[in-house]
Image: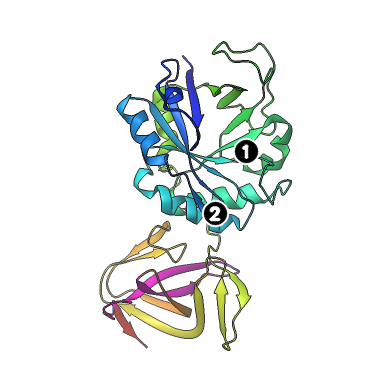
Amino acid sequence: MPLYTVDVYSGSDDSIIRDPHADGVIVKATQGTGYVNPRCNHQWDLASQLGKLRGLYHYAGGGNPVAEAQYFVQNVRNYVGQAMLVIDWESYQNAAWGNTNWVRQYVDGIHRLTGVWPVIYVQESALWQVANCAGDCAVWVAKYASMNWNSWAVPNMPVSSGAFATIAGWQYTGGDMDRSIWYLDAAAWDKFAKANTANPTPKPQPEVNPAKPSDEPNTWQDALGDTWHEEKGTFVSTTQLHLRWGARTTSATVALLPAGSVIKYDAWSRHGGYVWLRQPRGGSEYAYIVCRNAQTNEPYGTFK
């Protein structure tokens, strides 16, 4: 039996969330790297109180896709595992519209950070822009019979899935409210919220790359605004530590390393309350590990 949902943003009336036809509510959380929906928590809590399935979406601003993935996860981290995560790919206020690699980089970033593959929302005519995500992500297609289809009745019309094997959801009206039908049951919806346990190792793509040079020699600032200093050395841990795909405590884990592990590094950065080391892993891939508490200066190992 299919599910029906509404999606809401800061200007949506609570009556849309309360609509008894809606089995689920998908709430706008963030946009770009500078906007958080001020009513997101309220809308989430109301949907929860009503016993509805929940999702959270990020509206693509078209900036750095890794930075936008990081921004979204930072703001919804308390809900990861409870909500379907969605990337909203539209042309309005999107500087990267037409870029066929932007969403691919974004979904890889979300997967590295959370272990979850987000659902992609896109209009039918732009499915080609996200075709390279079809092997990992589900798609939620927007196609309207008309902007005046103010009804829960589903219009009789074909909807393409493009490169995707099938569509997970179809947003079929956006007049008085955004209504969608999902070809899922509640158990399948819940699986979208959970980390992919069948393939727990995230794709190893570097999360932090040099973005602009610094005035200091052998120093650079990455795309997330963190300053890195070139330094080659060896770190030996004295406690159990996470080796991660990114230099954030929310980044996905490569491995949980025991005390006594030896890490060869080529750069360090002080941010987020820690001193981080960068481990080269071949090609352009890197992993990251904390080596010191930046506030107390307590080390988590020794250096050679």
Say left or right for 277 vs 107. Answer: left
Percent coordinates x, y for residue 282 in the rendering: 56, 70
Nearest to the observer: residue 234 or residue 188: 188
Q: Read off the magenta span.
A: 273-300
Residue 179 vertical placement versus 208 (above, below): above
Q: Comparing marks 1 and 2, which lies closer to the viewer? A: 2
Residue 88 vertical placement versus 285 (above, below): above
Nearest to the observer: residue 133 or residue 216: 216
> Which residue in the protein does label 1 denote?
134
Separation (CA) of disc 1 from disc 2: 21 Å
Question: Was residue 283 drawn as part of the magenta stretch in this picture?
Answer: yes
Nearest to the observer: residue 176 or residue 90: 176
> Which residue sits at x=66%, y=46%?
93
What's under tag 2, amino acid-wise? Answer: Glu
> Which residue sits at x=56%, y=39%?
137
Residue 237 vertical placement versus 204 (above, below): below
Q: Quadrant of residue 294?
A: bottom left
Question: Was residue 11 drawn as part of the magenta stretch in this picture?
Answer: no
What's under tag 1, amino acid-wise? Answer: Ala
Element on which disc 1 rests = loop
Q: Tell me how many marks there are.
A: 2
Quarter of the image with the C terminus is bottom left
> Which residue in the protein does label 2 denote?
68
